[in-house]
Image: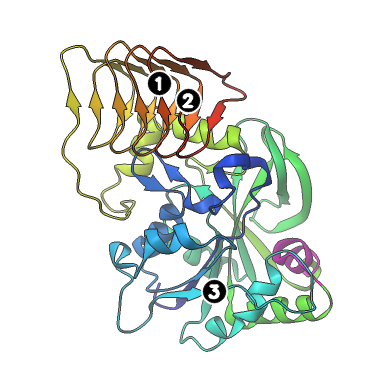
Amino acid sequence: MKTVVGIVNLQESNDLLRELAATRAVEALPFAGRYRVVDFSLSNMINSGINSVGLMLPDYSRAILDHIRSGKDWDLARRRDGLTYLPAALPDSDSRRGDLKDIYANLDFAELSDQKYVLFVNASYVYNIDFKKVLDFHKESDADITMIYKTAEEDQKGKSVKIETSTNGVVTDIAETNGIKKGEKSVLSAYLMPVPVFAYIVRTTYERGGQDFLVDGIIRHASEHKISAYEHKGYVARINSTAAYYKANRDCLKTEVWEELFMNKERPIFTKVKDEVPVQYKDTADVKNSLIANGCIIRGTVENSIIFRGVKVGKGAVVKDCVLMQRCDIEDGARVENMICDKNVIVTKNRWLKGVESFPYIVTKNTRI
């Protein structure tokens, strides 16, 4: 896919992620013990042979910059092509919100590239895909635009875009909706198209007052282009709310999901390398159905939980159905259930805290309870 330039959009709304994304981009959220959400989009691109990737920076970019740095962990630190940071548009009298203003400000990244196609993806999705197959499908369908979709396996909440297609994969209807029902086709905010088509949609839409690339750009230009749809049949999670983030992490405890996302030798998921000592399981430890990262010390009980690097679980402590980020400390006798603890949280001795599965209790970073 040397004919494709990738653009990764980090502009997902964080309104429904509350404290977790108050000072970081959604795509910078820690995931599955040692990864970040953005790792999936970058890894999918590099595994598919895309060597030139532009990263559209969000408003809160420090966590993203610290995590990705030069891009060397994704083999994107190259003298030619590689990783390019695309900063947000400079503040001016134009108060429009949405991602289109930032895309327009960085449009020359795609137009001045040597590649024929643009792959534009939203990085708030967790999935493992081969974009080579998408490119082959795009060429065979002779479409102007190819979008990737997933047939919903259950009802989903939140703003989404659904489509209807003909038997040959051509999009016959496309609309924004406040939720997706089981069996409907949900767009994964990933689009492949020739550079001139991309530039035309961005430029004409922005200069006519548009704000959102998908809604104001692709949907309103749908009648002008032949749009095809490629179905991704594997696992997909969209991180657009606290409940979705909590569920996606816990989905990784399922063997089939873990193997699909992380055990594919041809499409590994890369992340920033951090060397830690192995997990220490003390004599009093009791661990069931959990992911525990390096550097942890476990003396208590851990069930159905995701434990990130350097977490300590004290003697007699119970951690059940939780997501505990880096360097948390659950002291002796404490009990936490249905919780998300951000980095460096300390739950003191014999303290009991409990949320519910549909509304996990959140503790912000550096909090002592």
Q: Secondary structure at mark 1?
A: loop
Judging by the rendered image, the residue that carries numbered circle 3 is 118
- From this view, report whether residue 100 is shown above or below residue 325: below
> Disc 2, disc 1: CB below 8 Å?
yes
Q: Earlier in the sequence, mark 2 or mark 1?
A: 1
- Report the disc number at residue 348: 1
The local crowd at label 2, few if under 14, some if 14 to 19, many if 20 or more residues have their Cα within 10 Å, is few
Q: Would residue 32 appear left or right of 159 to someone viewing this image?
A: left
- From this view, report whether residue 257 is shown above or below residue 233: above
Q: Which contiguous range is marked in magenta?
A: 210-221
Task: Say if the magenta span includes residue 211.
Answer: yes
Q: Position of residue 110 (x, y in %)?
A: 54, 81
The local crowd at label 1, few if under 14, some if 14 to 19, many if 20 or more residues have their Cα within 10 Å, is some
Residue ID at (84%, 78%): 208
Q: Earlier in the sequence, mark 2 or mark 3?
A: 3
Q: Amino acid at mark 2?
A: Ile
Q: CA distance from mark 2 to mark 1?
A: 6 Å
Q: CA distance from mark 2 to mark 3?
A: 48 Å
Q: In terms of depth relative to the viewer, which is nearer, 323 or 252?
A: 323
Q: Position of residue 52 (x, y in %)?
A: 41, 75
- Report the disc number at residue 369: 2
Q: Secondary structure at mark 2?
A: loop
Q: In terms of depth relative to the viewer, which is nearer, 94 or 250?
A: 94
Q: Amino acid at mark 1?
A: Thr
Picture quadrant of residue 101: bottom right
Q: CA distance from mark 1 to mark 3?
A: 51 Å
